[in-house]
Amino acid sequence: AQKVTQAQTEISVVEKEDVTLDCVYETRDTTYYLFWYKQPPSGELVFLIRRNSFDEQNEISGRYSWNFQKSTSSFNFTITASQVVDSAVYFCALKETSGSRLTFGEGTQLTVNP
Amino acid sequence: NAGVTQTPKFQVLKTGQSMTLQCAQDMNHNSMYWYRQDPGMGLRLIYYSASEGTTDKGEVPNGYNVSRLNKREFSLRLESAAPSQTSVYFCASSEWVSTGELFFGEGSRLTVL
């Protein structure tokens, strides 16, 4: 069975601090996809990134970076120089290639204070 | 671009009442989904439709029915609402089930008294 764990329920930082959101996953499949979604206060979930299990290269997009480590089954998300607009709930998700279901973690509420 | 549109945005029901949540997407996506979001539980898949004419159960289908009306529209029906169905419901779509990249609507907040 597939499972995603986001141990950090809430994180609060001050603007310009760096923050890392943790994601640990479980799957029996050898091929799968990992995702991060952002849910701002408006409520709509927004896709941020998709990685497949064959590609362990870290990815950077502006202030966002992702660290994928198969050895520890982790797919962590770092925001550099956080801003108030980064305040949101962030979800990590897993989809096995053989399956049709996207399994979400419980989400991490990030609050960035001015 | 509207993307994924859900109606209604808010609804209050009494136990035993029925209602239908409507969802439409304008991205020509083949696959559509209904999720529910509850505090501390992330999003859980209720039903999905891999392509027009097909529907399948997700993780928590009990108490719900769905209809894939056409390629654009996917509705979720509660036949006899229960307080346990108080939740925020999200419709989503993707090009195909295999892609995994979902586009979400803004959500529908349902309260069952």
Image: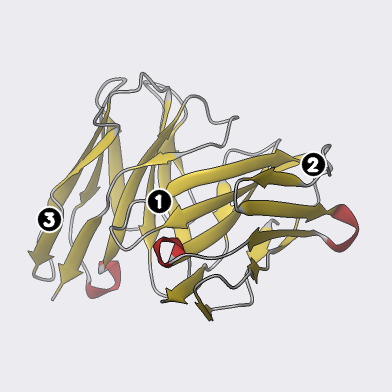
Mark 3: few/some/many CA within 10 Å (<14, 14-19, 20+): few
Asked if the residues shown at circle 2 and circle 1 are in contact, with their CB atoms under 8 angstroms apart, the answer is no
Mark 2 or mark 3, which is nearer to you? 2
Q: Position of residue B74 (x, y in %)?
A: 28, 34
Chain of the residue that carries numbered disc 3 in the rendered image? B
Task: Tell me the quadrant of the picture where the N terminus of chain A can be found.
Answer: bottom right
Write the residue at 13% across / 71% down: B15
The residue nearer to you, when weighing A29 against B104, is: B104
Q: Position of residue B16 (x, y in %)?
A: 12, 66
Identify the mark nearer the N-term, 2 or 1: 1
Q: Chain of mark 1?
A: A
Q: Is residue A82 left or right of residue B62?
A: right
Q: Nearer the viewer, residue B87 or A63?
A: A63
Report the Cα–Cα distance between label 2 and label 3: 43 Å
Instruction: Give x and y (percent) for residue B91.
Output: 33, 44
**Looking at numbered disc 2 in the image, what kind of residue is underneath it?**
Ser
Q: Which residue is mark 2?
A: A53
State the residue at coordinates (56%, 47%).
Answer: A102
Identified at 25% across, 69% down, the residue is B86
Mark identifier at residue B18: 3
Chain at numbered mark 2: A
